Image (cartoon, rainbow, N blue to C red):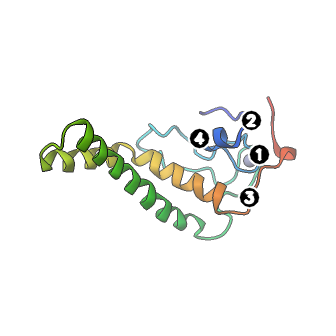
Amino acid sequence: MSKNNFVANKGAAMLQCKCPRCQSGNLFVTKATDLSSFMKMHETCPICNLRFEIEPGFFWGAMYVSYALTTGLMLVTLGILWLGFHDPEFWIYVVSIIGVVFITLPWVFRYSRMFMLYLFSPLRFDKNYTKTN
Ligand SMILES: [Zn+2]
């Protein structure tokens, strides 16, 4: 994920955290698994120079997206425990849900921002900005 390569498909570009305009440049400086710096974003796209924070406080909205994602993850975990493990003891629910929320934190953080950029901003893919090598 450290290379800046064009991703033709919008879904794949989101999944790989690429710039919404050129779908070539990376949004984030490091990998999601770099726990000390998974939040670090490029201020502008390394390929097309787009400023990612399109207006001051734009990414505050990502908080609501992350609420939704986290709630979804909690419900899925609950469902898996309920159905797959035959309704275990209460503490197992608590520990599992806290564990899942902690482990997925870097991805929830990143994909909330991706959803904000791709779905709730006027930015659209423009092939004039791509770098295809
Ligand atoms: Zn770009």
Describe the element under mark 4 as helix, strand or loop.
helix
Q: Which residue is mark 2?
A: 6
Q: Is any atom of residue 37 visible in this view?
A: no
- How far apart are the alpha carbons under marks 2 and 4? 13 Å
Q: Residue lying farthest top? A: 133
Question: Which residue is found at the position 62% from the left and 47% from the top?
Answer: 27
Q: Where does the image place residue 116, in percent across and percent down from the top left?
A: 60, 59
Is disc 2 in contact with disc 1, using a CB cutoff of under 8 Å? Answer: yes
Q: In the figure, 94 relative to 9: above or below? A: below
Describe the element under mark 3 as helix, strand or loop.
loop
Describe the element under mark 1 as helix, strand or loop.
loop
Q: Which residue is mark 1?
A: 22
Q: In the figure, 112 relative to 58: above or below? A: above
Q: Where does the image place residue 26, in percent across and percent down from the top left?
A: 65, 42
- How far apart are the alpha carbons under marks 2 and 1? 7 Å
- Say which amino acid is labelled 1: Cys
> Closer to us: mark 4 or mark 1?
4
Closest to the observer, 94 or 53: 94
Q: Which residue is mark 4?
A: 15
Sequence order check, earlier mark of 4 and 1: 4
Q: Residues within 10 Å of mark 2 (few under 14, many from 20)?
A: many
Q: Where does the image place residue 15, in percent across and percent down from the top left?
A: 59, 41
- Say which amino acid is labelled 4: Leu
Sequence order check, earlier mark of 2 and 3: 2
- Say which amino acid is labelled 3: Leu
Q: Residues within 10 Å of mark 3 (few under 14, many from 20)?
A: some
Residue 123, disc: 3
Q: Is mark 1 within 8 Å of ligand 1?
A: yes
